[in-house]
């Protein structure tokens, strides 16, 4: 069984989906905010941690995650979780950290398919020249998240 909850955030409503024991997705949505069934403590905890993040009271998430994807995507998503709060990496950096510089495009594609944005911080990946590239919620949301974490970060919105 998959449970859902739609919560408000400073960058728009978020739809959190979870199984009995892990978060499976977070999506930007225009759906209205909804209540959650009393049986889903995990969704309430996810909401609490996201609210703390948006209020600058949390820098790391401690939620069980089960993003669905290929083995390579899973590796990329694990690598994204190693990027510290307030810092960025390029797609090139991610490919090098995965051990194969020739996988830059594959790493970028996997980054773009991240089903749990914010918690798996794909917003922290930018172009080698400091430009903002691709984000499931749009580049303005990516810029907002990066500035929340580090107001001194120099990025370019193209």
Image (cartoon, rainbow, N blue to C red):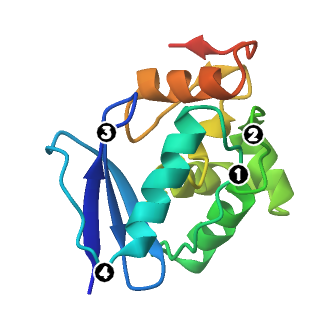
Using the rendered image of the protein, determine whether residue 101 is visible from the camera's viewpoint.
Answer: no
Task: Tell me what residue is drawn at x 48 percent, y 78 percent.
Answer: 22
For the residues bearing labels 2 and 1, Cβ distance under 8 angstroms: yes
Q: Residues within 10 Å of mark 2 (few under 14, many from 20)?
A: some
Q: Position of residue 104 (x, y in %)?
A: 68, 49
C-alpha gap between disc 3 and disc 2: 22 Å
- Camera-nearest residue between 138 and 39: 39
Real-space Cα separation, disc 4 to disc 2, in angstroms: 31 Å
The quarter of the displayed image where residue 24 is located: bottom left
* Mark carried by residue 60: 1
The answer to which of 143 and 71 lies nearer the viewer is 143
Residue wearing tag 3: 8
Residue 85: image tag? 2
Q: Position of residue 95 (x, y in %)?
A: 76, 53
Q: Circle 3 — which element? A: loop
In the rendered image, the vertical position of residue 41 relative to residue 89, given as above or below: below
Residue 120 in view of the camera: yes
Q: CA distance from mark 4 to mark 1?
A: 25 Å
Q: Residue at x 55, y 72 (%)?
A: 65
Q: Could you classify mark 4 by the number of other residues whose Cα lies within 10 Å: few (under 14), some (14-19), or many (20 or more)?
A: few
């Amino acid at each position: 069984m998959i449970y859902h909850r739609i919560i408000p955030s400073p960058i728009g409503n978020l739809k959190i989906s979870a199984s009995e024991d892990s978060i499976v997705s977070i999506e930007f949505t225009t759906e209205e905010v909804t209540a959650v069934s009393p049986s889903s403590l995990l969704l309430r905890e996810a909401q609490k941690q996201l609210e703390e993040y948006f209020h600058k009271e949390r820098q790391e998430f401690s939620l069980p995650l089960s993003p669905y994807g290929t083995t390579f995507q899973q590796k990329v998503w694990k690598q994204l979780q190693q990027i510290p709060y307030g810092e960025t990496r390029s797609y090139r950096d991610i490919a090098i950290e995965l051990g194969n510089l020739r996988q830059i495009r594959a790493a970028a594609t996997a980054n773009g398919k991240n089903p749990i944005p914010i918690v798996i911080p794909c917003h922290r990946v930018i172009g080698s020249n400091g430009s903002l590239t691709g984000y499931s919620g749009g580049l303005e949301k990516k810029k907002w998240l990066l500035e929340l974490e580090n107001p001194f970060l120099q990025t370019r919105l193209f």
